[in-house]
Amino acid sequence: MSLSRRHLLAALAAGASPLAARAIDLPGRPVKIVVPFTPGGVGDVFARVAGEIMAKDLGQTVIVENKPGANQMLAAAAVGQAPPDGHMLYQATSTAILNPMLYKKLAYDPKSLKPLWIGIETPLIYVINPKVPAKTLSEFAAWARANAGKANYSSIGPGNVLHLGAEKLKQVGNFDMVHVPYAGRSADAINAVLAGDVEMMCTIAGQAVPFVQAGKLRGLAVTSAQRLPVLPDVPTAAEAGFPSLAVASWYGLYVHSATPDPVANKLRLAADKALADTAFRERFIAQGAVIAPPRSGAEVAHYVEENSRYWGEIIRAQKIELD
């Protein structure tokens, strides 16, 4: 057997290899990315930009279908119930791992989906109204302990990473705050902090960037491993003395769990092209995101598992459950 033939057979046997992935052709119809958000938001733009890059690499059309509703479960169900041939992808976020832990009844079987690719990580940021007498996360925790029952925080509702991030801060900071939810209305939640109706919010860093830059909100810490280029003066949670807060939300793609590995690998490699694309990187870095590193299928699964373990501990500790 020649050396090249041995290499070829080894590549075909290794489902994660680029050669094995390239040997698999998807049938000619378009690949569809089902987005659980309305058009125009970060998730929608993320799917469309990544889809355009994937289309060039795959040599076929990639379309986006918006299917918002039921805390992202309608989109998840559409993909989980589709044929497992790689033609339908679910644009997932951290909510994909939270829903099975929060809801007794789901609109889909979570085992019908598996993580395929992580594109961007969206660090959280702890922000306060500038009138609160605290310049650091430690000072805010001390102020909240000294003013028991007076500290409030807003969120877009229970059971999402923003709510859980604030609950984690309460836990590690050993203080209490009153949760003031705004039922999915992110603008209302952050406006409540701007107006001084509540003192604090844990939010996606990108949402807070213009307000922190303008001095309308005070950023106490970001949960990324390094400081964000768009907010260089805001320390990381580890720098602020709260290393256990170092976690991020994320945007990625899921595929039907029965999708053949060579097909999944082909799709993942096509999506990986976005991670090195200059326009893709600049667009999302400017919004406070961190570009994820390329990961193998096993590494993606491990990343999501670790993420699930982190949030699950908070959900169980706070006994959070949604109907």
Image: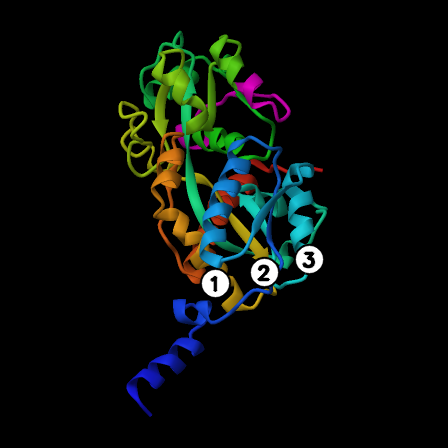
**From the viewer's perspective, is residue 95 above or below residue 26?**
above
Q: Secondary structure at mark 3?
A: loop
Q: How is the image coloured?
A: rainbow
Q: Quadrant of residue 281?
A: top left
Asked if residue 185 lies in the magenta stretch, the reply is yes
Look at the numbered discs 1 and 2 and tell me whether their residues touch, using CB distance below 8 Å. yes
Q: Residues within 10 Å of mark 1 (few under 14, many from 20)?
A: many
Give the residue pinned by disc 3: 82
If the image is split into quadrants, where does the C terminus sit?
top right
Residue 73: x and y in percent read: 67, 43
Is 15 contained in the magenta span? Answer: no
Give me the C-alpha separation between circle 1 and circle 2: 9 Å
Which of pointers 1 and 2 lies earlier in the amino acid sequence? 2
Question: Residue 4's spot in the image, x, y percent?
Answer: 31, 83
| Residue 228 located left or right of residue 247 | left
Q: Residue 266, which numbered label?
A: 1
Q: Nearer the viewer, residue 276 or 298?
A: 276
- Residue bearing the label numbered 2: 86
The stretch of residues the image draws in magenta is: 171-189
Instruction: Please state which amino acid type lies under the numbered disc 1.
Output: Lys
Q: Left or right: 162 with respect to 288? A: right
> Badge 3: few (under 14), some or many (20 or more) residues near its Cα, within 10 Å?
some
Q: Position of residue 284 (x, y in %)?
A: 40, 35
The image shows residue 167, relative to residue 280, as above or below, that is above
Can residue 107 be seen by looking at this rendering?
Answer: yes
Point 48% across, 28% down: residue:
166
Callout 2 crowding tier (Cα within 10 Å): few <14, some 14–19, many ≥20: many
CA–CA distance in space, label 2 to label 3: 9 Å
Q: Would you say 42 lies left or right of 321 here?
A: left
Q: Residue at x 41, y 53 (%)?
A: 272
